[in-house]
Amino acid sequence: MSEEEHGRIGEDSALTEHVGLHINDLPEKSLLSVLSYVPHRELAKTVALVCRKWRLLSYNGQLWRDMTFRAEYTDYSVQAQAIMALISVRLANQLRSIDLPCEFITVPVVHELANKCPGVKRMTLDFSKATQLYDFTDLNSFPSNLYSLCICLSEVVFLEGFMRRVYSFLSSLKVLHLIGTFDLSSESEEKFEVINIGKIRSYTPNLRIVNFYGVTFVEDNHLEMLAASCIHLEVLAVNYCLQVTGSSLKHLTSRCKKLQTLLLRHTDLKDEYMEAVDWHKCKHMKELDISCTDLSENTIMELLTKLPSLSFLSVAHCDFFTDKVLLTMSTNNKLELLKSVDLSNTYSLSDQVIMNYIQTHGHMLHGLMLNGKSKLDEHFWLAAIPHLPNIRILTIGKAHGWFHGNMSRVHVDQMINALATHSRRLVRVEIQWEPDTIRYSDKSSKFIDLMRMRCMDLRSVTLADGGYYEMFRSNFERADRQKVVRPTNRYQTSILSQLKYFNELLFN
């Protein structure tokens, strides 16, 4: 027998051995791991029809631990009359988190969750589209081991009739989200206090993280109430709460000694209240967001030089964050521990001072946002990028540059090459220059190849929709990286993921 024939026989026997293998031969644990990536709709309507074994696997409770029934966040639709059976049969002891739209928040459903799902830790109750509230007079049980509760508020539906029945079940709560209607309401409309924050805080003494997002009726007296009861508070976020002026912060910081994160984006902060706070006593505070506020230069400088050890700072759209502020922070050694900073749209900050900061402290940075500054062109970034070896998140460029008088073209290829060479730990990058501003050619693809192959952790590249975006997207798709390249009109890159408690602050 020739060696060639002997080799063919060996190949045939190997094939025979492999033909006997089947996906069902995998251990159940491995199959469940594979099926965990399949959407719930496909599990129920496709996977369950394959065979008896797959039907049992597709209905395994481990695959149904995290459920959302809000139509805008899932393609798995359930009729109101069927949700009771789903909870009692399929979810039961395995359920860990659940999102309910207003039509599913009824006495029978809540009772079924409380009785059949003792392990549920996270719950979202969405009342944002409610026009009226169900009668909850007969509600006498509620999940009592919740770790996190998110309530999406309505502009007109008062929730006290519901809340008074559940207050006594909230003692275990450590994370509270109240999501308001900032995007929908106008300044002239009357603001109704549709939920009683004072009562909530008296029943939740163990709160660690509080997020009031766009709640139009939240004022400083509500924060005073929190300070009085929730002394273990570590994170307070009141972004887009326009009636917060900062008058409660002195009392809050003196009571809540463990406070680490304070997010005050787009609030109505006043200089006199911010200057009255003993910031030097906030030993644990490491993360601060004062973006889109009207604080003066002196107030910002006093605030940032007194805080002992900031690692996260966002001052986007702060007109009075100036060269003097940044230089004073540098003189007082307040930039040495800073790992993530948002300086986007800080028009009072000069290019040279920014460059000096990057050259001195760039090696420390994990997140940097410098978009919205038209004078920071490719020459600036070619000099800056070599000083950013540890950068994970980066946003650069300026949209609508033509409108602001920036008519020069940006040569993007060398910038991509510099990122691929010096910033290999990059995870997310956003380039905001528009197609008419970016200059590229057919040879640009080789620089894109270089970035794709060297920046192996890259998860998101956000670009303005146009020819360069299409070239970037097709390059990554050919390498089977389908969802990496995204358009700026649908996605926005942020350094918020660098926050210590970012995952706990997520909602929706």
Image (cartoon, rainbow, N blue to C red):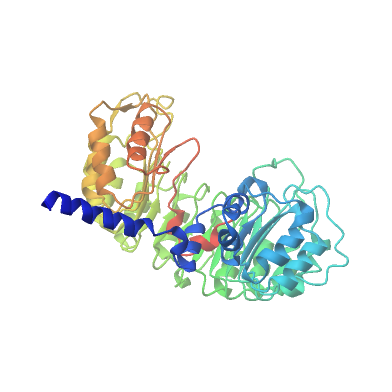
Name the side, left or right, on which 334 lies relative to 161.
left
Q: How many marks?
A: 0
Where residue 115 sits: x, y (%)? 75, 73
Q: Residue at x 50, y 53 (%)?
A: 290
Image location of residue 2, percent across then percent down: 11, 51
Relative depth, front residue between 378 and 265: 378
Q: Is residue 3 above or below residue 469?
A: below
* Residue 200 in sight: yes
- Asked where in the image residue 300 lies, by quadrant, the reply is bottom left
Residue in the image at 12% along x and 53% along y: 1
Which of these two is toward me, 4 or 256? 4
Return the residue nearer the eye: 414 or 293.
Answer: 414
- Image coordinates of residue 96 in percent, x first then y, are 61, 67
Viewer can see residue 275:
no
* 304 over 357 or under it: above or below: below
Q: Residue at the location (47% across, 72% down)?
A: 281
- Residue furthest to the front: 1
Closer to the camera in the image, 221 or 276: 221
Q: Is residue 353 left or right of residue 401?
A: left
x and y percent of residue 436 in the render? 37, 24
